Amino acid sequence: MSPRARRILIFIARMAIALAGIALLYMMLFRAQDAAWQRLQQGEALRVALDPSFPPFDTLDAAGQVAGFDVDLARELARRLGVPVTFTAIAFDGLADAVMAGKVDAVISAFPLDERLTEDVRYSQPYFEAGLVMVTRTDSALTSPDELADAPVAVEWGGQGDAWAREQKLPHILRTETPDEALNAVLEGRAEAAIVDAVTAAMFAKPGLAPHAPPLVFDPYVIVLPKQAPKLADAVDEALAEIMADGTGRKLAEKYFPHPPGPPEESQR
């Protein structure tokens, strides 16, 4: 064999090895990206982590079992994905870490969207909007925060609503000890509106109040998913969209909130 032919064969062999290596790397990457979805396709359970210390989203019932809005939502998601579901209770600070470490497939636990984690995890579309809202009496003529300049506005002292009211330079701010007291001030006529978070507004049991949309400040709750799980993320988003569109999300909210909010912004698109 001539030296030239030998060099050509060596080159071809090296190229074949390089291509085989690239193919192997691609297969490993593909498998890693779809590991969570492949587990579910084999009939394994959707492993959900939550922190059971934030009722009515996540809590423990009398038997010590997880319960709440997020638990019901997770079960409905798993039903639509056609898989069982298991739950792991983890302190809130460790929830995202559990996903990143591969210990669970999802966090469904009133988890606010945190832009700082987007390099490490995926987020679903929002399923609950917990941001600041304006609340008035149901018979109030106020319809927009632009009309608050001449109205007494109740807020929790030092809370996010207080900060928002100061940023807007509202002249008539009534500061209360708790957000519930701010809502009571509206019912009692001591304030024309209250600025509170949407969870407080949804949980307030007394009738006669109306939260207004859209929120003044957005703070959506999302499902946290592994970064390398695009198929699972797509399936979860599709199921969430169906849940919000067919009324199931509303029924779940009505079970836990006296004043259930409407679907979050992205779910309405």
Image (tube, grey):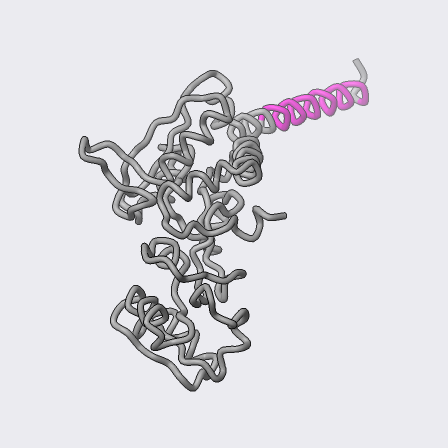
Q: Is residue 64 left or right of residue 73?
A: left
**Residue at the image point whose x is 65% and y is 27% from the top:** 18
The quarter of the picture where residue 57 lies is top left
The quarter of the picture where residue 20 lies is top right
Q: Is residue 20 left or right of residue 262?
A: right
- Vertically, is 157 above or below 65? below
**Residue at the image point whose x is 51% and y is 43% from the top:** 124
**Residue 92 position within the rendered picture, expressed as x and y whole percent measured from the top left:** 30, 47
Quarter placement of the N terminus: top right
Of 16 and 149, which appears nearest the observer? 149
- Vertically, is 191 above or below 150? above
| Residue at far front of view | 139
Does the segment drawn in magenta span residue 34? Answer: no
Does the segment drawn in magenta span residue 20? Answer: yes
Residue 233 visible in the snapshot: no
Residue 9 visible in the snapshot: yes
**Residue 179 position within the rendered picture, expressed as x and y whole percent measured from the top left:** 31, 66
| Residue at far bottom of view | 171
Q: Is residue 28 left or right of residue 64?
A: right
- Vertically, is 169 above or below 128? below
Of 87 and 97, which appears nearest the observer? 87
Of 227 and 148, which appears nearest the observer? 148
**Residue 19 position within the rendered picture, expressed as x and y whole percent measured from the top left:** 67, 25
**Residue 153 position within the rendered picture, expressed as x and y whole percent measured from the top left:** 40, 77
- Vertically, is 170 above or below 90? below
Main secondary structure along the magenta-highlighted residues: helix
**Region in magenta:** 4-24
The quarter of the picture where residue 2 lies is top right
